């Protein structure tokens, strides 16, 4: 795996490890029911998506290069 | 980049659904509250899956007529992408279920039907890899794909509507297309579905090109 892909994967999945700290799903229920500060969520999701979109474009260009070499 | 239009459009529509989906007004529904927004994400996954599998089904039909290796690879790539969408749809549905129905899984025809469908398509990939990568394997796989698609329609589209179900749209429940789904939601949902179908097609296309390069 290329270094860039590895770091991207770590950066995007690191927040999930924070969620793993909640021991019981019963404790997670009030959290999952809360709202507010939704713009932060929009921004975060936007960043995640921008990263994935950039990766797709990068992949597409790389494959095009390989195809043109052949 | 070839096919730039549909690729950019797909990304733009998905990005739209990710932002507006979180910000748009929603109807005031009991129990669901903000989670009705999952309509744009969870349901889109399943719609996209059906589209991918339909494309794969079409490619399998074409392969049986033409015997073209490229068509066979397209069928495989689209089915792969369909399976990816189904996994995402299943996981998102389980989270949504836990915090609305109270459990990650219920003994529900729709849920069981989608799980069975996923197993059927997993068997398609096992079938493909069990042969010696020959034309014969490809023909058998194409025939299996056709049956798999038909069974998918039965298990997720027909059977759940005939029996009792918790899931919206089945067992006598109104689908999210009566009083629950108003035009504010539709305005984000339809672009989301189209966006995911286009993006899924793009990723399937990338996988297809990689397969062609390595043959």
Image (spheres, rainbow, N blue to C red):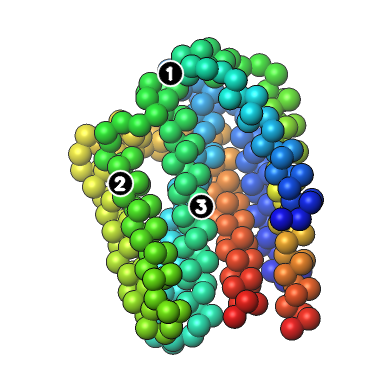
Query: In the picture, residue B102 is in which quadrant?
Result: top left
Q: Which residue is mark 2?
A: B113
Compared to residue B96, the image places residue B113 above or below, namely below
**Mark 2 and mark 1 residues within 8 Å of each other at the beta carbon:** no
> Residue at horizontal 20%, vertical 39%?
B163
Where is the N terminus of chain B found, in terms of image quarters? bottom right
Where is the C terminus of chain B found, in terms of image quarters? bottom right
Q: Is residue A41 left or right of residue B161?
A: right
Q: Nearer the viewer, residue B97 or A3?
A: A3
Q: Secondary structure at mark 2?
A: helix
Query: In the picture, residue B126 is in which quadrant?
Result: bottom left
In the rendered image, residues at marks 1 and 3 fall on the same chain: yes
Q: How far is the residue under mark 2 from the one under mark 3?
A: 17 Å
Q: Which residue is mark 1?
A: B31
Is residue A5 visible to the viewer in this orientation of the structure? yes
Q: Chain of mark 3?
A: B
Q: Nearer the viewer, residue B5 or B45?
A: B45
Q: How far is the residue under mark 1 from the one under mark 3?
A: 29 Å
Compared to residue B205, the image places residue B197 above or below, namely above
Q: Which mark is residue B84?
A: 3
Q: Secondary structure at mark 1?
A: loop
Please state the horizontal and vertical placement of residue B18, each as a whole percent of the image. 65, 38
Q: Chain of mark 1?
A: B
């Amino acid at each position: 795996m290329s270094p860039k892909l590895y770091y991207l994967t770590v950066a995007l999945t690191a927040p999930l490890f924070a969620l793993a700290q909640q021991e019981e799903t019963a404790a997670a229920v009030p959290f999952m029911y809360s709202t507010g500060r939704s713009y932060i969520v929009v921004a975060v999701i936007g960043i995640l998506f921008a990263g994935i979109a950039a990766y797709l474009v990068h992949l597409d260009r790389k494959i095009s290069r390989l195809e043109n070499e052949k | 980049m070839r096919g730039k239009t549909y690729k950019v459009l797909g990304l733009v529509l998905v990005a739209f659904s990710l932002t507006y989906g979180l910000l748009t007004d929603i109807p005031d529904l009991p129990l669901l509250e903000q989670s009705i927004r999952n309509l744009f994400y969870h349901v889109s996954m399943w719609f996209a899956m059906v589209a991918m599998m339909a494309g794969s089904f079409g490619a399998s039909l074409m392969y049986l007529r033409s015997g073209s290796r490229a068509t066979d690879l397209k069928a495989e790539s689209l089915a792969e992408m369909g399976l990816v969408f189904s996994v995402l749809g299943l996981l998102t549905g389980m989270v949504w279920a836990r915090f609305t129905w109270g459990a990650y899984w219920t003994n529900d025809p729709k849920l069981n039907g989608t799980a069975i469908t996923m197993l059927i398509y997993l068997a398609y990939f096992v079938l493909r890899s069990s042969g010696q990568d020959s034309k014969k394997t490809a023909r058998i796989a194409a025939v299996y794909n056709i049956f798999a698609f038909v069974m998918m329609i039965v298990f997720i589209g027909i059977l759940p509507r005939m029996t009792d179900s918790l899931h919206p749209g089945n067992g006598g429940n109104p689908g999210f297309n009566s009083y629950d789904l108003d035009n504010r939601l539709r305005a984000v949902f339809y672009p989301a579905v189209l966006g995911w179908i286009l993006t899924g097609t793009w990723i399937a296309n990338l996988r297809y090109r990689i397969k062609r390069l390595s043959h």
